[in-house]
Amino acid sequence: MYWLVAGYNTMPKEEKEKYNIKGIANLFGNVMFGMAIIIILGYLIAKLTENQSIQNYAFWTSTIIGIPYLLIKSNSKKYKIKN
């Protein structure tokens, strides 16, 4: 399901061969899983403490940290295949 990675499905075949899509997809999965864990923990802590603002903090923290990390890491040279 690599075609779900934005921009990858529109690349020409020659360009696609320059990227390690398995590594990029693995990175996406791990980061999204980590973000989900933070959001779920925030929800559970908010329910236990009856402080709903914790849920919002968890969501925004995971978003503000997760998305830039994902963009920076996936665009690094680590996932480009050297010719």
Image (cartoon, rainbow, N blue to C red):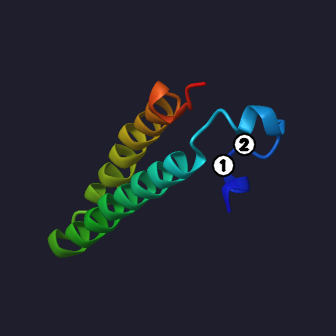
Circle 1 sits in a helix, a strand or a loop, which is it? loop
Question: If the image is split into quadrants, where does the N terminus sit?
Answer: bottom right
Q: Secondary structure at mark 2?
A: loop
In this view, 55 is above or below 63: below
Identify the residue at horizontal 81%, vertical 39% (top origin).
Answer: 13
Label 1 with label 2: CB-CB less than 8 Å = yes
Instruction: Tell me what residue is drawn at x 38 percent, y 55 percent.
Output: 35
Q: Is residue 11 visible?
A: no
Total labels: the figure holds: 2
Q: What is the C-alpha distance between the residues marked 1 and 2?
A: 6 Å
Q: Position of residue 29 (x, y in %)?
A: 47, 58
Residue in front for this viewpoint, 54 or 69: 69
Instruction: Determine which residue is flagged by label 1.
Output: 5
Q: Residues within 10 Å of mark 1 (few under 14, many from 20)?
A: few
- In the displayed structure image, the side of residue 64 where residue 44 appears, left or right: left
Q: Which residue is mark 2?
A: 8
Residue 81 percent across, percent down from the top left = 56, 32
Q: Position of residue 16 (x, y in %)?
A: 72, 38
